[in-house]
Each structure stands twice: as structure tokens, then as C-alpha cells.
Image: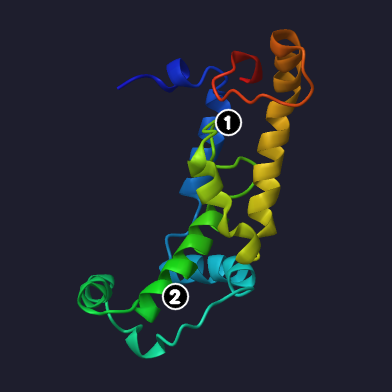
Amino acid sequence: MYPLDIWFKNLDPGKVKSVVAAVDEVTPDYGQLLARHRKVQSEVIDRASVDFGGSDQHALSAEEMLSDQKTRTGLNPALLENLFDMGRYWLFLRSGEFPPMWGHININVNLQVSGANAGDLPEAMDAFSRWVEGLSPASNERKEHLWSSRGTVLNPSDPARR
């Protein structure tokens, strides 16, 4: 196992100890933790929903829904509803000050944020926009030097933005 400071050059051990201490102070009460998160997350998650008529199938497990999907002609409505909810939930969880894109400029980024507008998750688009805007200064300078052109050329492995 590698020491963290090899991978994270700016890692401050004092901050790590502070985070560990804060986590240690959390009361390990599932009901209390769930209530705290539900209060914050339900406000966001309840903004949008879909109803494809799958309410009578929501008691099925994921495996049962997938098995049902394999044997039916059309789409399993409960499975589609769950996929919509799951996608919005994970996109919301991965949004914030530090977006999950971590320098991957490819189709995956578009897929990661594609549901943000339809799913009413402006938080996700804010994080994405800040990330892209953070790439722009080095990209603008590079395209002028390399191609004498206007616009932006994004390079995910540009050492100038690290």
C-alpha cells in the first residue's frame, strides 16, 4: 500500500486527522442518520419523478424485474422508473464543489450529466459548468499557440491545469 502523500501531494495530515475525528463523533444510529439525510436529499429527489405504470411491480427485487424484462415483449415500467430514480440519485450524490468527472473528457461526461436538466438537478450542472470553465484558461492559451485560432481545445491530461 502506498502512503497517501505519494498520490496526494497537497495532503495535509492535520486535515486528515480532523476529518477522522469528525467521523468518529458521528452517532452510529441508522435511524438518526437516515432522517438527517432524508431531510436534505428528499428535497432534491422529490423534484421530479416518472410514472410508467409500474407501481404494482415495485415490490419486486431488482433480479425479479430483470428476469421479467427478459421474458416480456415491452419494457418493464417499474424497472424504468427505478432506473430514472437511481440515475438522479447518483448524479445528485456525485455533484457538488468537486464534480465526479476528474478529467475525463469523453462521451462518459455527457452521459453522466445528460439527465441533470430533465431530472431537475441544477446542482449537477453547476458542478459540471465549474469544471469545464476551470479547463478554459489553459485551453485558450494552448489553442492560440498551437493553432493560432480562437475557441477552446480541451485536453484532459494538460499538466497546466493540475
Q: Quadrant of residue 11?
A: top right
Amino acid at the residue labelled 2: Glu
**Label 1 crowding class (10 Å Cα cut-off): few <14, some 14-19, many 20+?**
few
Q: Residue at x 64, y 71 (%)?
A: 43
**Residue located farthest toward the right when viewing the structure as drawn:** 150
Q: Quadrant of the C terminus?
A: top right
Relative to 27, say whether 137 is above or below. above
Residue 8 in sight from this viewpoint:
yes
Left or right of residue 154, residue 13 in this image: left
Q: Quadrant of the N terminus?
A: top left
Relative to 11, say whether 55 is above or below. below
Q: Nearer the viewer, residue 47 or 43?
A: 47
**Label 2 crowding class (10 Å Cα cut-off): few <14, some 14-19, many 20+?**
some
* Badge 1 element: helix
Amino acid at the residue labelled 1: Lys
Q: Quadrant of residue 120?
A: bottom right
Q: How many marks?
A: 2
- The answer to whether mark 1 and mark 2 are in CB contact below 8 A is no
Q: Which residue carries the number 2 mark?
A: 81
Left or right of residue 50, residue 67 in this image: left
Residue 21 in sight from this viewpoint:
no
| Residue 86 x %, y % | 45, 65
| Residue 8 x %, y % | 50, 21
- In the rendering, which numbered label is found on residue 52? none
Q: Which residue carries the number 1 mark?
A: 15
Q: Quadrant of residue 54?
A: bottom left
Q: Residue at x 63, y 52 (%)?
A: 124
